[in-house]
Amino acid sequence: MKVILLVDFGSTYTKITALDPELNGIIGTAQSYTTVETDIAEGLQAAVSLLEADSGKVEVVQLKACSSAAGGLRMLVSGLVEKLTAEAARQAALGAGAKVLKVYSRQLTEADASEIAAIQPDIFLLTGGTDGGDELNILANAKMLSKLDLKCPILVAGNRSVAPECQKILANNGKEAIVCPNVMPKLGTLNIQPVQEEIRSLFLKRIIEAKGLSHIENLLTGIMMPTPVAVLKGLKLLSQGHGKEAGIGDLMAVDLGGATCDVYSIAKGDPLSINTILKGLPEPFAKRTVEGDIGMRINAHGIAAKDGLERLVEMCGIPSDQLNVMIDQLSENISQLPESEEQKRLDQALASLALETATIRHAGSVEETYTPAGLMYIQEGKDLREVDQMIFIGGTLVRGEGLEAAAEYCKYSSRYPASLRPKQFRTCSDKKYILSAMGLIAEDHPLEALRIMKKEIVYEQ
Amino acid sequence: MTNKKKKLVLGVIGADVHAVGNRILDFAFSQAGFEVDNLGVMVSQEEFIDAAIETNADAIIVSSLYGHGELDCRGFRDKCIESGLGNILLYIGGNIVVGKQKFEDVERRFKDMGFDRVFPPGTDPNVGIQWLQADLKVKNDSSTSSC
Ligand code: B12
């Protein structure tokens, strides 16, 4: 049988989706472990074998892939003011599918410099100053970076009056520096798309190869984008529709994995009432955040941090010393599935709290202020209270009733009244993990991808 | 490089929502040849400062209309210094205190807080513009900028 094969090389699993060449629907999906140590082709072959066991022999006529394997796209970003250019740079990198390991603002110190050299990111995004604005900061930071033993390309997307000079400083010291349009050309205006395109092209041109993922050339050229970008594309299409085929409207999505938790929102999130004033940078309509410190396995300790442990005790009725031992085990044994009743309760609680934290960090917040004219509200970020659809991506860890219960933790709650999360939503789940696959064909075949997503994710519950 | 437009950050401080005068000032200053970044109403000290840093502004123009200006402006200059803006030009105008008080007293109190110019209620924007042109020229000549 001829198929189009769509592949997501994840950090742990390689997930495949086979479509018939006319794109009428899904023939099958399967997953196997990602094999970066040897060659990712091996894990892919294993997944294909699993698929063939169900659907019969397949002949791949086209292959498209996205990847977050081998650490994904690791980026560092710097800006001038934490809430302005540094934040714009962070948004740009996140939307380009990167894992943002650290955000620097103001002048880089010697200590920052050695940290950067130790991290050796895949890309460094250097910003600062509006066009015509501050020049000194980005110049100083370019000088600091130029002295480092830094192998990655550096994107210069700050004040355009000095961007060429920054490039020169870096290039004179043997760095690959690329000038892009400013991420914040005017105060409060985001312009992150050009930089994101450059990030994607670097990812394709250099980073995939540098990671030595595979010896099979065809496989490498099939990789089109980082996984989160594919997911964003899929979600945007599902939300907005294409031509006459309507989308499903504003939505949110979460992908809770072993090491991280990604949250997406496709919604404007403007203030809902006239006594609310919006502050801070405008946020992208299609927004992604990723929490690198919380996950169900490797980063289970992140969920238990701060008052997390106390809440876990409360939620699963297991004493804290025992919980600590169980969490230790989980974080060391990343492929462990819950067996005992207690382990299941712990997984359920971990998922709930992880979702709570990740959605709070993604959503905007509101602060009450009493003015002489009465109560006013100051909103920062997106107001997502009216968003009424939530998609759970993958989610092998909680299912069925467990999923509904965990989903409650994504909602607006009186415990965190300032956090503007959805009040009510229907839950949809992408059980077969097809969202990234649909994102891969979203540009070339939007109508087909949209129909498949609606059928598989929204209506086939 | 010498004939660059001078850059201003403009806004109404505190929990003040009086928006009309702010738009007029934006228009007037822009017309007079300044590059204006208008932060609108309900602007905190931090927002003024962040904006001035990122845009490398030459002056911060604060309005306060609802009478609480004195409270809202407390520590503003100190924060500018702390954030590296140092002696950036600071103006304030509007109905900056409650009711009718002797303006000389009000002016002195705001100058003590580190404001360079303080304007009484209903000051014509053009008056502000003239002072700005004078002050910025002076500043320009005395400071030896690197470029
Ligand atoms: C409209 C109005 C409102 C509207 C505002 C709507 C809006 N979103 O803009 C509403 C109803 C919301 C309102 C609310 C309040 N208001 Co009111 N409001 C007014 C009113 C009638 C007109 C303001 C206006 O638009 N003027 C026109 C513009 C063009 O003038 P302007 O704002 O003064 O700005 C010019 C100059 O001051 C100058 N300027 C301003 N800043 C600067 C800075 C520099 C550097 C320079 C050179 C010049 C300069 O240039 C501007 C442009 O020409 C005034 C009374 C009045 N006639 O001025 C009261 C007035 C400002 N409000 C007042 C008060 C007390 C309030 C309230 C506290 C309570 C109330 N009475 O309702 C609340 C506060 C709300 C809040 N949180 O801010 C008082 C302030 C008293 C004081 N400071 O001692 C006033 C003066 C009325 C009064 N006489 O009591 N208000």
Image: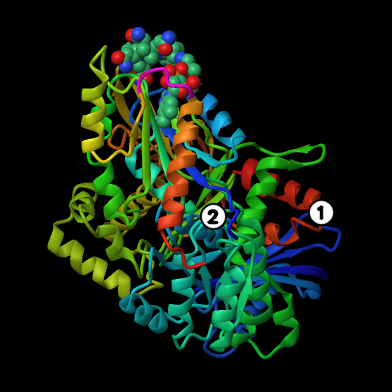
- Mark 2 — residue? A130
N-terminal of the pair, mark 2 or mark 1, is 1
Query: Where does residue A171 sit, x and y in percent of width and height?
Result: 59, 84
Ligand 1 sits in quadrant: top left
Residue at image location 26% in from the left, 66% down from the top? A327
Span shown in magenta:
B120-124
Instruction: From this view, report whether residue A412 is shown above or below residue A123.
Output: above
- Mark 1 — residue? A24
Residue at image location 49% in from the left, 40% down from the top? B133
The rendered magenta stretch, by its main secondary structure, is classed as loop
Closer to the camera, A229 or A205?
A205
**The residue under label 2 is which amino acid type?**
Thr
Closer to the camera, A191 or A283?
A191
Depth-wise, is mark 2 or mark 1 nearer the camera?
2
Query: Where does residue B6 sit, x and y in percent of width and height?
Result: 53, 47
Closer to the camera, A139 or A14?
A139
Question: Under tag 1, what secondary structure?
Answer: loop
For this view, does A89 lie left or right of residue B65?
Answer: right
Question: Under tag 2, what secondary structure?
Answer: loop
